[in-house]
Image: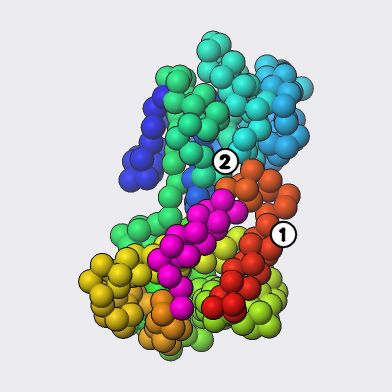
């Protein structure tokens, strides 16, 4: 397997021709998975608007039948030429992993295969099939770090000839991240809002980015921490109406509990107050959220936080494996966490 790391991806796309025809794009950042799969498809040289050359399937359509995918890869286009088979929402489907294993052992044919998958564990069958063959290129997509987010901001604003003040950049950095596609859309929306201005100010970020991205997501997470069921449902309604995926709230909730686990461990180990743990580990928390997190740290014990973190992780994995039920799984899981908070 050829593994392409995040910082190598842009350089990899410039290689002509691409050194493989089998690609697995996976990771917890679903927006980045989708974006990179689309970038791969764009450089294959195949006309993506030609329905006879491009076959798009959901992994559920393959299910446990590897023959479906193998047949599509070996089919000949109506008018000849190369073909692209594009699989989305892959996870634990046996047919997809078995088909990839067979295709990786055969001679390269005229078709290119791109598989979009969720966060695959080390021993997952699909990831194992990719790792066992030199014919497959695997591209892992993890949440953007600070440097990647800075580059994303610079790229999108430069396209509109816009500059941004340091305070506005810091505020924007607080409101994006976790999902590349959602982050890019928020920066583009800010650029459109500020078109014609010489400099983007902090107030511009507050005005246009806040309600549709992290602040509305934080509203839902804060309601969970407070055990406020009605507040949570109201925040979720805003998120759904803004077209933000509910999954991002579940992902943000997991990150919040992981951060609280770290803070709580320091409190227990050093007998430190919650405020001190927040000062050490919560520097990037918005000042309005710090009292809510502090109260949550006082009511949630270390073992309880760990149990809840594990439950949230299991829910995210389940939502990857059953994409059709993603919203339902996310809502049920978060409502259960609201109930746990209210009991405390």
The quarter holding residue 83 reads top right
Q: Which residue is drawn at 56% across and 75% down?
A: 341
- Tell me what residue is drawn at x 68 percent, y 77 percent: 233
Q: In this view, does 151 lie to the left or right of 24?
A: left
Q: State left or right for residue 161 relative to residue 96.
A: left
Q: Work out which quarter of the rendered image holds the C terminus and state it.
A: bottom right
Element carrying mark 2 = strand
Q: Is the magenta stretch mostly helix, strand or loop?
A: helix
Q: Is mark 1 on a helix, strand or loop?
A: helix
Q: Which mark is residue 105?
A: none
Q: Mark 2 points at which residue?
A: 117
Classify residue 84 as left or right of residue 288. right
- Span shown in magenta: 299-316
| Residue positioned 73% across, 37% down in the render | 60
Q: Where's residue 313, x and y in %?
A: 52, 53
Is 309 magenta? The answer is: yes
Residue 249 vs residue 228, the one in the foreground:
228
The answer to whether 109 is drawn above or below residue 263 in the figure is: above
Q: How crowded is the residue under tag 1: few (<14 C-alpha within 10 Å), some, or many (20+)?
A: few
Picture coordinates of residue 226, whole percent (x, y): 54, 81
Q: Label 2: how many residues lie within 10 Å, few (<14), some (14-19) or many (20+)?
A: many
Q: Please tell me whether residue 31 is drawn above or below residue 264 in the rendered image.
A: above
The number of callouts visible is 2
Residue 307 versus residue 245: which sits nearer the camera? Answer: 307
Q: Residue 328 carries which label?
A: 1
């Amino acid at each position: 397997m050829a593994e392409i790391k995040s910082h190598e991806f842009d350089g990899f796309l410039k290689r002509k021709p691409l050194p493989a025809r089998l690609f697995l794009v996976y990771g917890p950042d679903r927006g980045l998975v989708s974006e990179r799969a689309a970038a791969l498809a764009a450089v294959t040289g195949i006309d993506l608007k030609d329905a006879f050359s491009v076959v798009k399937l959901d992994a559920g359509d393959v299910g446990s039948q590897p023959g479906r995918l193998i047949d599509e890869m070996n089919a000949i286009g109506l008018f000849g030429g190369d073909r692209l088979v594009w699989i989305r929402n892959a996870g634990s489907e046996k047919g997809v992993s078995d088909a990839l294993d067979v295709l990786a052992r055969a001679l390269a044919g005229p078709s290119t295969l791109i598989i979009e998958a969720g966060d695959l564990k080390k021993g997952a069958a699909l990831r194992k099939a990719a790792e066992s063959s030199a014919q497959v290129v695997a591209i892992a997509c993890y949440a953007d770090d600070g440097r990647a987010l800075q580059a994303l901001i610079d790229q999108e604003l430069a396209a509109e000839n816009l500059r941004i003040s340091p305070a506005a950049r810091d505020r924007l950095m607080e409101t994006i991240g976790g999902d590349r596609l959602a982050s890019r859309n928020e920066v583009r929306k800010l650029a459109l809002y500020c078109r014609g201005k010489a400099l983007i100010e902090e107030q511009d970020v507050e005005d246009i980015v806040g309600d549709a991205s992290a602040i509305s997501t934080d509203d839902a997470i804060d309601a969970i921490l407070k055990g406020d069921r009605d507040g949570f449902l109201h925040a979720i309604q805003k998120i759904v109406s803004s077209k933000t995926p509910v999954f991002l709230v579940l992902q943000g909730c997991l990150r919040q509990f992981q951060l609280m686990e770290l803070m709580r461990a320091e409190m227990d180990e050093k007998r430190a107050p919650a405020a001190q743990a927040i000062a050490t580990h919560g520097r990037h928390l918005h000042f309005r959220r710090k009292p809510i997190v502090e109260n949550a740290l006082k009511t949630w014990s270390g073992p309880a936080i760990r149990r809840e973190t594990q439950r949230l992780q299991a829910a995210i994995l389940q939502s990857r494996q059953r994409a059709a039920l993603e919203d339902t799984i996310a809502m049920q899981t978060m409502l259960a966490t609201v109930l746990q908070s209210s009991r405390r």
